[in-house]
Amino acid sequence: MIIVIDGLNKHKFPDILDEMYRLRARVFEGRLGWDVHVTDGKEIDEFDALDPAHVVCLDEDGDVVGCMRLLQTTGPHMLADVFYQLLDGEPPLRSSRIWEATRFCVDTKKLTGTKKRNSISYVTSEVMVGAFEYAREAGVLDAVAVIDPVMNRVMKRSRNAPYDYLGTPKPMGVVTAMAALMDCSDERIDGIREFAGIDHDVFLTDDQARALFDKTHKPAPIDSTGDDSLGALQQYCYEQVTQADSPEEMNAALALAETLSRNMGIPPSEKLKQLSQARAERRQESSIAAPTD
């Protein structure tokens, strides 16, 4: 099941993106030994800051089990700025109708079940279908990707063979790399679907993806009646508010309580609710009374 996260909806899915970056770290640094930058267990590079489209596959448990990054070639991209040696001195492709596909990976450790939808082959095909269908609907004609011979064979077996290559294969670290071209055509998509037995719509809506991921990843709200540490935290917030020496300190303490309530599932006490409501009313009154030019 595919959710595409781009510049328009990424604010809804920071946690899914975090899990995607963690998967990339496990695969590229941990399993493949690539020289990538990993911080706090997440592999993120400079191209992720360019608002690419991330094609993310969620399994039945809501776990991130596969992903791919799509980036326009009109600006910075990996083939132009990292793997340019593959082009043998030729200029990189630059077109709004050619996108670059990179950072493809699947969670091989999770995908060990015998069911078809839990297989590496199925998730690989589902990510490919999602990427090509999304690109096709955006008016993209071709995708370029830097792959290795193993991936090249996988793509050929799954009816997703590149139709051409740019430059010549070259050793990159411990593998040989090549720049491959794939068309975003109905024939390619139909072939991948037939190979994997995918006859349904692979895309989730934003709401469906949110609900599926939250099913197992969102912390359940804590019951304050049975948690002493929660009660102590609520009491601390209340004391900070009541002991504030200035309106600024009171606002800061109330903001902390509201943040805990919103982000950690901690329900505010009735006293804090009353204080927060009073602060909101004072702000509204100040706004109405403020002089205008």
Image: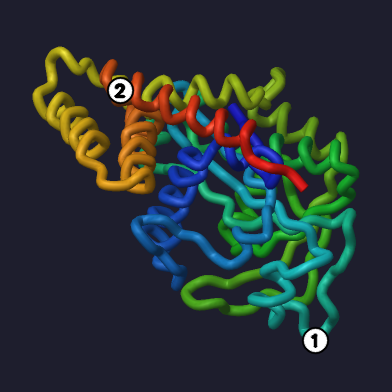
Q: Position of residue 171 (x, y in %)?
A: 57, 79
Residue at the outermost top position: 225
Residue at the outermost left position: 228
Q: Is residue 165 above or below residue 115?
A: below
Q: Secondary structure at mark 2?
A: loop
Q: Nearer the viewer, residue 220 or 149?
A: 220
Q: Secondary structure at mark 1?
A: loop
Left or right: where 228 falls relative to 266: left
Q: Is residue 139 above or below residue 81?
A: above
Nearer mark to the viewer, of 1 and 2: 2
Residue assigned mark 1 = 89
Residue at (58, 56) in percent of width and height = 103
User: Which badge, 1 or 2, comes first in the chain's sequence?
Assistant: 1
Which quadrant of the view contains residue 169? bottom right
* Image color mode: rainbow
Q: Is residue 158 visible?
A: no
- What's the amino acid at mark 1? Gly
Residue at (44, 43) in percent of width and height = 19
Q: Position of residue 270 (x, y in %)?
A: 28, 16
Q: Is residue 162 above or below residue 224?
A: below
Residue at the outermost bottom position: 89
The mark found on residue 99 in the picture is none
* Circle 1 crowding by C-alpha within 10 Å: few under 14, some 14–19, many from 20: few
Left or right: where 225 falls relative to 150: left
Q: Position of residue 260 (x, y in %)?
A: 33, 34
Which quadrant of the view contains residue 192? top right
Residue at (33, 41) in percent of width and height = 250
- What's the amino acid at mark 2? Pro
Q: Nearer the viewer, residue 142 or 278?
A: 278
The mark found on residue 268 in the picture is 2
* Circle 2 crowding by C-alpha within 10 Å: few under 14, some 14–19, many from 20: many
Quarter of the image where the N terminus is located = top right
